[in-house]
Amino acid sequence: DFVGKFAELSDIISSAKFIYLLLIVVLLMPVNWGIEAWKWKYLIKKSEHVPFPTSMKAIYAGISISSLSPNRVGEFFGRVFVLKETSFWRGVIMTVLGSYAQTLVTLFFGLNAMVFFLFPYVMDKDYVSESQFYFIYGIVLFGLAIVFLSFLWIAKFKFLWNRLKPKYRVAFTVLNDYKPFEMFNVFLFSVLRYFIFSLQYFLLLKALQIEIDFFNGMGLISLIFFFNTVRPSIALLEVAVRYMIAYEVFMLFYTYGNQDIYFTEAQIGLASSTLWLINIVIPALLGLLFVKEMKFVKNKQNGK
């Protein structure tokens, strides 16, 4: 059973190495979300100044609210309730920009990892020829480049929201103020945060004595994050799905990657679930402390 599968890990999780690396992963959690808070603060400054502590509260509260929402859409709404001078939908749009940048980073690294790690599998199954495989890869990269450039020059697309009704158009006009170098900075924030939570995952693998080198480890992690991004999810109900995806990715690598690494289902499952616990569950619990400070809670208490 589930408990029995993890009984074999008792020696590993009681080792000094595991405890030391686990502590580093835990300490990286506020770094991870701190970068997200700076990114959100950077985006929101177009409308109002938000102190960093307030931004952190918004991030944690957003995680709490998003934990029970499909694809974590509640995170957008949870953050904006700390804003005092910005309209609700204007705040949501600026928040979505940051999430969009994070998704772009995940897609870029994930798709490149997919080419590197899945190529032997695709060739073995004879699904497509090598030339067809790289042709498809070229098209995907070209599409990503177009999306990335569109993100940098988001202000150039004002002709799209200018067609909206005035009551909707007002919220989108904030996009006119973002310059390409500012959007590139948002993208860099996203890359840095991506590296931090990828490193957390890698350190957990090493803590559980999965002897994989840094390049292959980070590549497989990129692939796992890619699949977790493109699938539907509810944050507090997805630990089993995360574990299944991670295990299947590692099995593909073991089978077709010509790599002599040893791992068990229990090790992969524990690494995946521990990362989820540290980066989602703990911040969601912390966020409960700040939810009561939000405007929609105060309004409800005041009968508004």
Image (cartoon, rainbow, N blue to C red):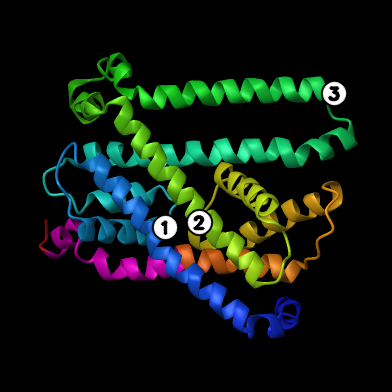
* Residue placed under numbered mark 3 in the picture: 129
Look at the numbered discs 2 and 3 and tell me whether their residues touch, using CB distance below 8 Å.
Answer: no
* Residue placed under numbered mark 1 in the picture: 32
Type of amino acid under label 3: Ser
Q: Is residue 84 left or right of residue 284?
A: left
Q: Earlier in the sequence, mark 3 or mark 1?
A: 1
- For the residue labelled by badge 2, is the local secondary structure a helix, a strand or a loop? helix
Q: Earlier in the sequence, mark 2 or mark 1?
A: 1
Q: Is residue 90 left or right of residue 196?
A: left
Q: Which stretch appears magenta?
A: 280-301
Q: Where does residue 251 sit, x and y in percent of width and height?
A: 79, 55
Residue beneath the point at 17% across and 55% down: 51
Q: Earlier in the sequence, mark 2 or mark 3?
A: 3
Q: Quadrant of residue 9?
A: bottom right
User: Label 3: few (<14), some or many (≥20) within 10 Å?
Assistant: few
Q: Where does residue 157 sit, x and y in percent of width and height?
A: 33, 17
